[in-house]
Each structure stands twice: as C-alpha cells, then as structure tokens.
Amino acid sequence: MIKTIIIDDEQHCTDVVLKLTSSYPDVFNVLGTFNTVEAGIEGTKFLQPELVFLDVMIGNQTGFDYLKQIEHINFNVIFTTAFETYAVEAFRFSALDYLLKPIDKDDFHATVLKLQKVVETSDLKNKIDVLFHNLKVKNALKRISIATSDGYVFVEVSDILYCNADVNYTHIYTKHGEKITTSKTLKTFDKLLSNNHFFRVHNSYLVNLNYVTKYTKGKGGYVTMQDNKNIDVSVRRKEEFIQRFIKIS
Amino acid sequence: MCLIYALLKKSFCYFVFIISAVLCSQEQKELDSLIIQLEKQTEKDSIRAQLLVTTSNKFVRKDLAKSYELAEEALNISTDIKWKKGVVLALRQMGVVYYRQGNILKATEQWYKALEILKTIENSALLESSIYNNLANIYSDSGEFDKALTYYNKLLSISEKLDNKSSQIIALTNIGTLLTEREASIDNGIESLEKALALAKEIRNDRYELSILLNIGLAYKRKRDYKKAEFYYLKVQGLAQQNDDKYVQILVFNNLSNISILKRDYAQGERYAKQTLNLAKEIGAVEWEASAWENLSNIYESRNQSKKALTYYKNHIKLIDSFNAMQNKEELASLEAKHKYNLEKQLLNTAHEKKQLLAEEEINRQKLIKNTSLLVGFIVLVASIIGVTLFRRKQLAVAKAKEIELKNKVTDTELKVLRAQMNPHFIFNSLNSINSYIVKNDSESATNYLTKFSKLVRKTLESSTEKEVLLKDDIEILKNYLDIENKRLNNSFTYSIKVDDAIDASNTLIPPLIFQPFLENSIWHGIAQMERSGHISVAFKKENNVLFCVVDDNGVGRKQAIKVSKENTSLGINLTKNRIDIINAQNKTKGSLRIIDKEQGVRVEVKLPLKLAF
C-alpha cells in the first residue's frame, strides 16, 4: 500500500483521481486531499506521504512552488496537468511522471505498473533538481535525465555531442568522452531536443549542431564532429541540414 | 547580371509613366484648381467622378495611396449612378495605381474588368485601345514584342484617325521605347521618340516631353553613349524638378547612379544612389528603394568594403522580397478563375456573334497570365542567380527571404486545415454522446469516451502544427478517430488499415490527417445510413515513387447519401484537394485525388509523392 495524498485546487479533478485510485484498493491508501499549496505543505509534513498527485496550476501558484518549499522530498511525485505545454516539456526532460487531464484509464494503469517498481530516492531528488534547473534557464542550458540500466544519469544538454540509434537502444556521446546507453529510442531524443540545436542528420544519428566542426559535400555529404567522428548526412536531410547549420554558425 | 535586372525593371516603369499620361488626355489643369473644383462639386454625379479620376491621375506621381482613394471613390460613384464609362475610367485609373505599386496582377485585373464593361458601350474605340495600350506594356515587359507592337500600332492608327494628338504621342513613345529595347532597332526607336517629342512640344505638354526625353536617355545608355545619355537625363531632371515630379526624379537619379557606376565614378554614383533612396522612401516606391540599395551595395563592393556591401544587399533583398510576395501564384490562380467565371457569365448574356470575340480575348488573357507568371518567375530566378554568384552569405539572405514567403503560405493553409480537422460537427457530436451517457448514468462509458476524445483532440492539435508527420503516427490518430466514431455508432462498423510491406511506415512522411475527411464521409454518409453493419478498409501501397492510398467503404454510396442527408459534405474533400494542389505546387509533384462511386459504397484513391524522412 502506498501512502498517497492529492493536491489540486479543483474538486472535480480530485474526485477523478480518487475514483481512479479506488479501483486499485491494494495499491493506494489515500490519506488526504488538499486544494491549496499551503494546505498541501502542512498535510505533507503531517501525513508523511510516499506519493503525491500534484496539479501544476494551483490557484495562482504552481505545483513547483509547493515542491520548492518542501525541505526533504522523500516521496514520489506524479504531476497532473491539462495543457501546460512548458510544464509537459519540463517533465519530459527530467523524466518525471505526469498524467494529462482528463486522465485516461489506460494511462493511469500504465502509471500504476511503474509505481510498483522500486524508486531510488536519490534519483528522484536529482530529477526534481533537473526540473527546477530547466524551469529557470533558457533552452541551450537545459539538463536532461537519462534512464540507464543502473539508474539515471543527469547530463547538460550542451554537453551532448551526438546520439546514435542501435536498434531499441540509444548511445549518447558527450564532449567529456562519456558514452551513455539508454533503452529509450532515438526518436524520443529527437522530439525532446530538436528545439535545442539538435538535428537528425540520419536515420540513426542525432547531432548537436554546435559541435559540428565541418561539413563535407557529397551526395548527402558528411559532418565531422568535435571528437573527429564522421557522420553521414542522409540525402533527404541534406537541404534542411544546411539551412539549420548555416543559421547557427 | 545585376545590370540586366535593373534595366528590365526600368523599362517596365517608363511604360507605366506613359500609360498614366493617357488618362488625363482631356485637359491640363493644375492640381490645386482640381482640388478646389472637387470641393465645390460635392454632388455624387458623373462630373465629380470624372474630376476624381483626373485628380487621381495627378496624384499618381506624388502620393499613390491618395491616388487610389480618389479612383476608388470615382468607381463607387460611377457604379451607383450606373455610368458605365465612368466605371471604365475609374477601373483604368486603379489599374494604373496598382501598376505603379508594382502589383501587375491587380493592375491587369482592373483592366480586364474595364474591357468587359467596354463591350457593352458604343463608340469606345479610343478608350478601348488605350486599355490595350496599357496591357501591351505588360506584354512588352514579358518579352512579347510583336504582340505589344500590334496593340501600340492599333492605338496609333485610331488616334491618327481621330486626330488625337496626345494618344498619338503615347503610341509613338511606346513604340519607340519598345524598339529601343532591341539592339537592332535602337535607331528606329530613337526616330520614333523624336517624332513624339516634336508632337509633345507642339501641344506644350511637359509631362509627355519628360517621359520621351527619359526614354531617349535610356536608349543612349543602351547604346553605351553615356555622354549623350547623361545630357538627356540632366535635361529631364531640370524639367521634373520644375513639375515637382518625384517619381521621374527617382528614375533619373537611379539611372545617373547606374551610369556613374559604369563609368567607375563611384563617389558620384553613391551621391545619386542616395538621392534615389531618399526620394523613393519619401513616396514609398519600394522597387526603386531596392534598386538604390543594390547600387550602393555594388559601389561598396567595388571599394572592397564587403561588410557594408552585404548590409546594403540585405536591404535590397528584403525589399525585393516584399515586392515579389505580392504576386504569388495563388493570386494568379484566383485571378484566372475569376476571369473564367466572368467570361462565362457574359457569354450567357450576349448574343452569339460576340462569342467568338470573347473566346479570342480569353486566349489573350490566358497568355497574358502565363506571361505575367513567367515574368514573376524570371524576376525570382534572376534574384536567386545573383545570390548564388555573389558571395555565399548573400545566398543565405535569399534563402531566408524565400523561406519566409513560403512559410506565410503554408501557415495560411495550416490554419485552414486546423479548423477543418477540429470539425465543429465532430466536436459537438462527441459532446452529445458523452452527455447521453451521463443522462443514462453510465459514468464508466462517459469517462472512457471523454478521455479517448480528449486524447484525439490533443494529438490532432499537436500534429496540425507539423507540415508532415510519420505515416505510423498518422495511422495511430486515424485509429483513435475510428474507434471513437465506432463507439458512438454502437460498433456498427469494422475497419482494417493495411500498410504494404514495401512501405516503412516509420520512415514515410505524409501531410497530417489528410485522409481523415474521407473516413468521416464514409462513416457519416455511407455507413451511418445503413441498416446492416459496414466495413471500411484503408490500404497504403507503393507504386514507383508514389504513395497510393485507398479508402473503401460498403456504405450507401454518394447518391443515396445526398438523398438522406442534405448537408454539404464537400468542405473536407475540397480542403484535401487544395492541400494536394499546394503540395504539388511546392514539390513539383503530381499528387491526385479520385472519388469512385461503386455499386455498393464509395472508393477514394489518393496519390501522394512518396516522401521518406531519411
């Protein structure tokens, strides 16, 4: 049984989460529901929950305001939001869980399955750090949480040289010479990073345009990265690549 | 290359200058007295309309916006009092204003409207030939010299018959100008211009004299007789200043700047270019502003100050772009459609003998439209060649400008698509269904339905901001859509979506939700009307470089559907047609759409260019 609280300023949203949790009586033990940030903080101190369903917009404050005021976050957080694009992007970067309202039964089920796995509290703290960091800084300075076989790695986006797809895995190469392997697909990173100077030059390569040192012409041509690695540019991506590349340099 | 470009534009505007002179062929009253007369003549009658046109023409050289305003009022008055000739005069004047603004398409549109109305007026030979004269200017711009010459000669012979001196001058000047455009006939051209000059002096018309001198100057410039050219230009400059004709002053300064550059007198060239720039800014003549920046850029490049040259060149490209943007293809297409429509309307109304005349005219019209688009194309081509041959960064400026233009077009369509995808019909039907579950107290179904519905809305909103999505993702959304509709219809149909093995759905790009309107039609006009359960099959195949998509249903078919429901269902289909047309135009492909009525149900075949992501 997971000790759970719900923080949401709209009663009907709270009701929906209550309804959904009630269909998993063996999993959730809902201790309380709160409709302001202040009440949520008090409730958290008092009830010591293991899981918080946290709304993003709470009155004129946010769920982030709530988290900032908790000294030791030793519980899991699942954000709930309707359409705050910036927040959803931030969750994706930090690999924090979120549910989109109105909450779909199947999505909720997937979340329940995830919750039953063991969560490292240190990872959670780092993820939330990444979240706060990204909410503060501009695009290029963002950090990203990457799930690996033994926990999470937290990387500055501007440290990534390129990503390489390997069937269902992705290898991420950083400028410090590290190689990080994750079970997320390259497409996931493409979606996440395409607004941050990253470009998919090839079906299996996503490169950080800031580290492309040279482009050599050819049918599609190839790029040379800062670590001297040559990466082919797909013929169909050539034109767009050149446009993006020139825009940056 | 730059020089050719500049010359082309130049000659084009000399013609304009002449045309506008046609319009005030009656009398030479001063602008002030015209304005006073206008103030007195407040009655909305033909006298005021005539006055407005005359005054508008005076303003063409000083204030294009004001000129347009006056012509528009003249058009409104003439339309109200059903004075056809006034309508024609006003339209002709509006055309001239558009032409001055560099908007060829709009200009021709006005002139063709005028010609259509003229067909119903007797004794209008001179008026008609004056409009043909205007159109001939466009012919000569697009290189159809013989045709232009024919129209000019028509004007000449009619005006000689009627002994109308000013029309003779116009015809002679335009013929002369045209002839001087070709190396072989330059001297003949100058001869013709001299004739016109003599006539202009005879009737003491400064304005005609101005334009003729200007053209003679250009002819000598073309002959590389710079000394003589400069002599004529300086003469024009004096005359233009006397008449406060800023437009002509711009032309003169620009040409003098060109000549100075050719003579490698860069200091002088810069002075003249700056004068051009100031005046062009003052009266808002975009293409001349652009030309001045180009000259400045050339001057600084010759002085090896490439940074400044680049900045000026960027200014040039920016202005050229805004000039070109006005004349995009879509406008051309709609213009063509409008003409066709008007023509058909008139064909019905007029007697049989007029038919042939109209048909002939339509051929001319279409040729003209073709030529105009060729001209626009040529300008774009020349602009990009300059970009390529000059240093690389200039290329970037051109690409950027083009990108913005294209983006605007695409955004426009995206918006329309977005609206159609979020078909209000669909939204409210869905909300109705949810409501009915709530009324029936079936909260389980209601919440299931609602969350599926909101997922679809979210995905649709996301994908409609993309120009292209992966086939795989698009199919997901289609499935989601079909599931929702099926739920609402109590599972009254089954569906299958098949993708041929030759297609890699996760590496194939298609425009988002392009098939959704067909599914919607199949469901609501095919299957929903049926008693028994239906089936929709969607299949994607590959044929050479074409993505071949078939949507098949076994519903009641289109004829039956129209009987059962009287709603207009073609909006979604039309929109899809438009999208395919735009894709074709952008990529020079041959996508197509075919709707086939089967014995049982409807089959839709869509062919799209097969586009891979990588």
Image: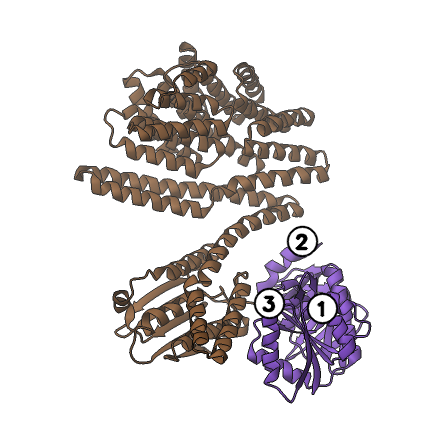
Q: Chain of mark 1?
A: A
Q: Are marks 3 and 1 in contact (CB under 8 Å)?
A: no
Q: Where is residue A226 drawn, in percent x and y?
A: 77, 64
Q: Is residue B176 visible?
A: no
Question: Which mark, by number, is residue A162?
Answer: 1
Question: Which mark, by number, is residue A247?
Answer: 2
Q: CA distance from mark 2 to mark 1?
A: 19 Å
Q: Chain of mark 3?
A: A
Q: Are marks 2 and 1 in contact (CB under 8 Å)?
A: no
The amino acid beneath tag 3 is Ala
Give the chain ID for the brown colour. Answer: B
Q: Are marks 3 and 2 in contact (CB under 8 Å)?
A: no
Horizontal side, residue A243 vs residue A70: left or right: left
Horizontal side, residue A199 vs residue B225: left or right: right
Give the secondary structure at mark 1. strand
Give the secondary structure at mark 2. helix
The amino acid beneath tag 1 is Tyr
Q: CA distance from mark 3 to mark 2?
A: 34 Å
Q: Residues within 10 Å of mark 2 (few under 14, many from 20)?
A: few
Work out whether A26 lies above or below A94: below
Q: Residues within 10 Å of mark 3 (few under 14, many from 20)?
A: some
Where on the picture, by quarter, is residue A25?
bottom right
Please state which of the two labelled residues, at mark 3 or mark 1, is closer to the viewer.
Answer: 3
Per the rendering, the colour in which chain A appears is purple
Instruction: List the residue tagged with mark 3.
Output: A82
Front position in the image: A245 or B56: B56
Where on the picture, by quarter, is residue B45?
top left
